[in-house]
Image: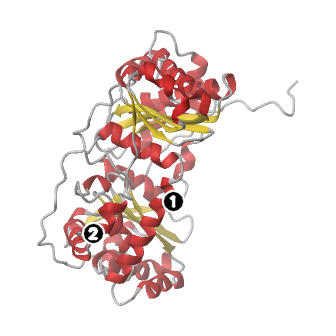
Amino acid sequence: MSQRFDLPAIGPAAAIAFPKPASHVLPNGLTVQAIPWPSVPVVAVALVLPDGAATDPPDRPGLTGLVADMLDEGAGSRDTVALADAFARLGARFDIEVGSDSTMIGLTALARHATASLSLLADVVFRPHFEQDALERVRDLRVSRLKQLSQTPAAPADRAFLRAIFGDGPYGHGVLGTTTALELLTRDEVRQRWRESWRPDRATLIIAGDVDPAAAGDIAMAAGLGASIDTAATVRRPSSPAKTRGAGPVIWLVDRPGAPQSEIRIGHLGPARSSPDYHALVTLNALVGGQFTSRINRNLRETRGITYGARSAFDFRRQSGTFECGASVQADATALAVSEIRRELAEVREDRAITPTEIAWAKASLTRGYARGFETARQLVRAASVLVTFGLPADTFDEFVPSIERLVEDDLTDAARRHLHPEAAAVVVVGDARHAEALGASGTVEIIEPAF
């Protein structure tokens, strides 16, 4: 007899049929994609630009993020406060997100206010003010944020890890950049960077929700998004983010005397999002360190009792990404944690090391809730922006669940052998140097201080 507290059996994963967007190109070159989703009278919008932090000039890390942060600091005929008030009066939600490979402006509004909301978006994108006082204010906020982050253990670990993997390459820094670079930036540099990048012929506008796909182009035109603007500036092409350094046996220590815990990052270069091993790798990661029941978490948390949680992840980018394991562990267990993580990564590459039960749970964790990511117009817009950013096929999301379900043990083992390299992994530790001495057995320990 079934007990009332028995866990339910895992059911089949729901099939995904991602709607194919209707596409229009406006006279100024802006591509408009429309996805009808009339379940509620709302539209969600994403304007995607193929420039992210990786396109920052080498001596100006953080420039792309600063430009994006300045866009809504006054635009068109409105100053900062009036612009925010205009969005609020329409009940529109506006946000800007900068990643390593792209910049996305998000907008959510009632369908009846779609044209008016997009008109405000057109002001933000095409007619930002870039006033000096706004620049000073935004710069001060970002510098203050950097100072705050420098006092946490996780941020220095993340910064040092990127530098260990990518060196001085375009992927070697984060969106915020550094205080030194931010303080050097001028209004002219910010405006010039905007003129180079924020061009309609380089952007894609995605609209999902209660919208007629055939009318999407007309709505964008009526909102002023089809306007011609000065495109005389030459688009600056960054050096290829693929020019990265191998991780090698580097061990970097950020000394924090007296710290009761050590923040650890271990990893190396990883494949691009376009890798044919993508599905095998996300499944492999789920069982290695991507979920609570993963090998690394059970080892360090349950067996060793030296952390509250450990995880791993592939950061898939347009070009070479990373594979990274991270944890905050007891200070006196720093060397043990590094050793155990490396051991787990090595063992998963061995024949018959991966069990059928592990594969089943990893697949279930990835596929059974997958459909929940496509329920709202905002989710559809974000999904479509991923396709645009990485140049992925239209059936990418439809094929995710079937591709995961087809995987067998050999697929994961082969992927582990090709893409997991614990012997060449970089190690970054933020913690008390006294507890990191044992790391010297794995290589030379170099004490560093990441730039903020």
Image coordinates of residue 184 in percent, x first then y, are 27, 67
Q: Earlier in the sequence, mark 1 or mark 2?
A: 1
What residue lies at 34% left-to-right and 50% top-to-bottom? 173
Disc 1 marks which amino acid?
Gln
190 left or right of 108? left
Mark 1 lies on a secondary structure that is helix
| Crowd rating for badge 2 (residues with CA inside 10 Å; few <14, some 14–19, many 20+) | some
Q: Is residue 311 visible?
A: yes
What residue lies at 46% left-to-right and 17% top-to-bottom? 346
Pointer 1 with pointer 2, Cβ within 8 A: no
Q: Residue at label 1?
A: 148
Residue at mark 1 to residue at mark 2: CA–CA distance? 21 Å
Q: Is residue 405 visible?
A: no
Mark 2 lies on a secondary structure that is loop
Q: Residue at label 2?
A: 185
Quadrant in which the C terminus is drawn: bottom left
Of all residues, the one furthest to the top in this rendering is 351
Toward the viewer: 40 or 102? 102
Q: Height in image: 407 above or below 200?
A: above
Image coordinates of residue 333 in percent, x first then y, are 60, 27
Quadrant in which the N terminus is drawn: top right
For residue 131, which quarter of the picture?
bottom left
Q: Height in image: 384 above or below 25?
A: above
Image coordinates of residue 21 in percent, x first then y, are 36, 57
377 left or right of 217? right
